[in-house]
Amino acid sequence: MLGKEFCWGVSTAAYQVEGGVNEDGRGLSVWDVFAARPGAVKNGDTGATTCDHYRRFPEDIGLMRGLGLGGYRFSVAWPRVQPSGSGPVNAAGLGFYDRLVDGLLEAGIVPLPTLFHWDLPQVLEEAGGWMARETAFRFADYAGVVADCLGDRVPAWVTLNEPFIHMVFGYALGVHAPGRTLMLDAMPTAHHQLLGHGLAAQVLQEHGGQVMIANNLTPVRAASDSDADAAAASAYDALHNRMFLDPLLCGRYPDLTAFGVPPGLGGSVRDGDLEVIAGAPLDGLGVNYYNPTRIAAPTAPGLPFAEAAIEGVPHTAFGWPVVPDGLRELLVALKRDYGHALPPVTVTENGCSTVDVPGEDGAVDDAFRIRYLADHIDALAAAVAEGVDVRGYYTWSLLDNFEWAEGFSQRFGLVHVDFETLRRTPKASYLWYRDLIAAHRARHGR
């Protein structure tokens, strides 16, 4: 049974929903530049307008109020606040988040801002991006700017969103902004993001705010009982999960020698860095869960693992396997592996892309999404029954939006968005989630 104070929420991200990229002094982000490259994003889509949340946020708050939400996780666009990535503050851009937070509070919704959701100011990328140690210090300065403005009304913050995904897709493989293809040479971006988190956490906690980080985590399953597959799965788990948990919760990096990475991430880690990363204890851990990962021994030179398909389960429109019990498995494993070092957990993202087409009456019947959400919430509740301290669930996402390199081809929202007219239409899943939240509140007399 989920408790009285359990928080039901939704999540979005600035570049995916805001639009207004040329409004009120906002600077260029790496995603503005990346999306302008021919072939970088499906169909040449960009986030220039997307859902126009920058102008339409009062309407979107109305949709959130209609759901009866307890919380809204959104991200702050660093280029909107500090167009050059440091120095002068853009008062007009910061003012948008000031109004957004006030509107949320008036609607009875607790704001949960994420400070970095992949939209680095382009100026900082040109100076090295997250490959440059200095970016961690600029991030802490930026965190202080936002906390100075919003900290009197924001009880908790998420510093970074999915540093593993940003490292791999943005810097190693080049399929996301900034589009660099460094492969294993991208490892310093992991440490610099975590160092930025630690520095920012100090600043945020000095302002009285609680601090979280949102990691994309996956239960890793060996493809067979063979020693080779087990070793490959262990290597992948170290890279995907423990590389971004062990420094935070244990003050050390896992063994990454299977990737040819020497201790200290090739010189990136300096004296005192791990004390900074782990020194401001997490008040909560954000878990973004979408699916498990099945790993086999490599069949060709290169990485020490090979990803294997998960068969015999449904798949989303994105092709991701649907394994709800993986969420329970993941949460229980976190408690087992980290024990008292594990802070309270919030599921900060969980959702699916489906093919959502309005019917003749305009309604969107997304029964697949309803089943997906119901099964994952059941899995979360099962983890709570096994003793995991889970404080909230934020589904991805409130609105159909710009899905990074997939453009507008993947729809994750509880609300359908017509990207030509920007009309919002609540889907059947919106009504289902509304009723779920109402029933929970009724059980607890709220």
Image (spheres, rainbow, N blue to C red):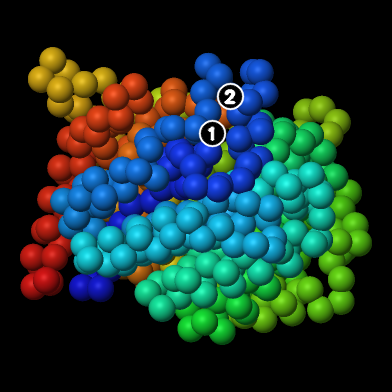
- Please tell me which of labels 1 and 2 falls first in the chain: 2
- What number is the disc on residue 404? 1
Instruction: Evaluate whether residue 213 shows in this view.
Output: no
Q: In this view, does 58 lie above or below 315?
A: below
- Can you give x and y, in whole percent of width and height, for residue 156 in the image? 44, 72
Q: Are marks 1 and 2 in contact (CB under 8 Å)?
A: yes
User: Which residue carries the number 2 mark?
Assistant: 41
Q: Local crowd at mark 1 within 10 Å, few (<14), some, or many (≥20)?
A: many
Spatial distance from mark 1 to mark 2, Cα to Cα? 7 Å
- Can you give x and y, in whole percent of width and height, for residue 229 in the image? 70, 41
Q: In this view, does 264 lie above or below 23?
A: below
Q: Local crowd at mark 2 within 10 Å, few (<14), some, or many (≥20)?
A: many
How many numbered marks, from 0 up?
2
Going by the numbered disc 1, the residue's amino acid type is Trp
Q: Which residue is drawn at 35% across and 25% down?
A: 419
Q: Viewer-proximal residue, 266 or 39?
A: 39
- The quadrant in which residue 410 appears is top left
SS of the residue under disc 1: helix
Q: Viewer-proximal residue, 196 or 217?
A: 196
Q: Quadrant of the N terminus?
A: bottom left
Q: Is residue 102 above or below residue 370?
A: below
SS of the residue under disc 2: loop
Going by the numbered disc 2, the residue's amino acid type is Val
Q: In this view, does 300 lie above or below 232?
A: above
